[in-house]
Image (cartoon, rainbow, N blue to C red):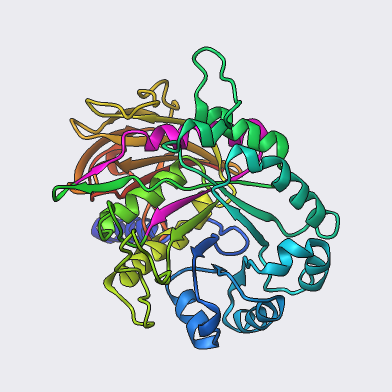
Amino acid sequence: MRKYVILMMGIALLCSCAQERSETLEKNAGEFPIMAWIGVPESETTVERFRELKEAGININFSVYSSVEAVEKALDVAQQAGVKLMPSCPELSAEPEKTAKRLMDHPALAGYHLRDEPGAADFPMLGEWVRKIQSVDREHPCYINLFPNYAGQEVLIGKDGVLAAGEDPYAKHVEMFLAEVPVPFISFDHYPVVEENGVRMLRSGWYKNLEIIAAASRKSSLPFWAFALAIAHTPYPIPTIGELRLQMFSNLAYGAQTLQYFTYWHPGDNTPWDFHDSPITLNGSRTVVYDRIQTVNKEIHSLSHVFQGAELVSVWHTGSQLPEGTRPVGQLPQEIKKLDTGAGGAVVSVLKNQQRYYLVVVNRDFQAPMTLSIETGKTVKRVLKNGTIAPVRGSSEIVEVEPGDVVIYTWGK
């Protein structure tokens, strides 16, 4: 009898553990938005091409079209593949209200692409352009993408722009933009992995750029969009899985609500940039980068319940050398008793999504693994890469984090 009781207790325990391992968190409505910057071109407007885009894990396509008629055709085709468009066409500039009225009711329309990397001198004109479109359509956003923080000061704040003592020109650039242009989100690009003499490294100001954008996002209550580089060109190498993960998971750790790839399709004549090895080449064939972004996007979509709609609570960095503009780990939530990444550096953020909290740890090294040692409270669980959650055995664990990869813990209702 005693053996029978012990056996039944063991079976119950195994069933309980199996049930806990298979537990999943409630998904948010819709997919996590991921946009192809220079996506399927007008000449390739077919259901097959848009389905190929969708299979890569991308659900928004930005392309430049020759006419509003070409946009309408692409909207119909994209809808069949479950993709939305963020189009640009000449009529959107020449007749913004009329063009918005023509496109706004199409279910595949994501928004209107207006301008990439404007200088401060362009802000008044852009503000007027956005207001014209919004007078007709306030549901679909106007897309304007900002420079990275390594752009020149004259471009960022204008020839006559004045900075206060100690004021950062990029922070001023973002502030001026939001004051003059009524956009519903902030988008910026910064491609951090560069190669010099065969050595790959991170640009020193990338995380400072994320800090400034995240701060502006919180202050303005506007979500922000961020990029990863998917096409090699001088001085940027062909991206590895580790580099793509680092860019995307760092963006998400800072609270990004839409992710973008520059570029998906080869942009064509590219002197002097020497573009090569885009996910889709100029002749329409796939490269290894297509497979890599597909892998990373699958991981992102599996974790959409963590990041989609999340609010950034805190963000810090570990390591012997902190990136410019960042802070060391401060007061961790009481549920996290100990966190150590050794000599390796990591992004450590706390996100809140509905009634749950998430500790997000991103290995800042895109070339080598990192050892994470963590001790947690009893209610903390680990979010696995497939989206399920599992207990932290014994309240502490040591995790080997792959290059650029992410480890996530959660607690709450």
Q: Is residue 57 above or below residue 308?
A: below
Q: Residue furthest right?
A: 135
Q: Is residue 228 magenta?
A: yes
Rendered image quadrant of residue 70: bottom right
Q: 200 or 120, which lies in front?
A: 120
Residue shown at 71% from the left, 81% from the top = 69
Residue 251 x %, y %: 44, 46
Q: Is residue 122 left or right of residue 312?
A: right
Residue shown at 34% from the left, 46% from the top = 407
Residue shown at 70% from the left, 79% from the top = 72
Residue 156 x %, y %: 54, 35
- Res. 1 visible in picture: no
Q: Residue furthest left?
A: 198
Residue shown at 51% from the left, 42% from the top = 255
Residue 178 x %, y %: 67, 37
Q: 81 or 387, which lies in front?
A: 81
Residue 127 x %, y %: 74, 44
The quadrant the N terminus occupies is: bottom left
Q: Is residue 86 above or below residue 236?
A: below
Q: Residue furthest top?
A: 165
Give the residues in magenta. 200-229
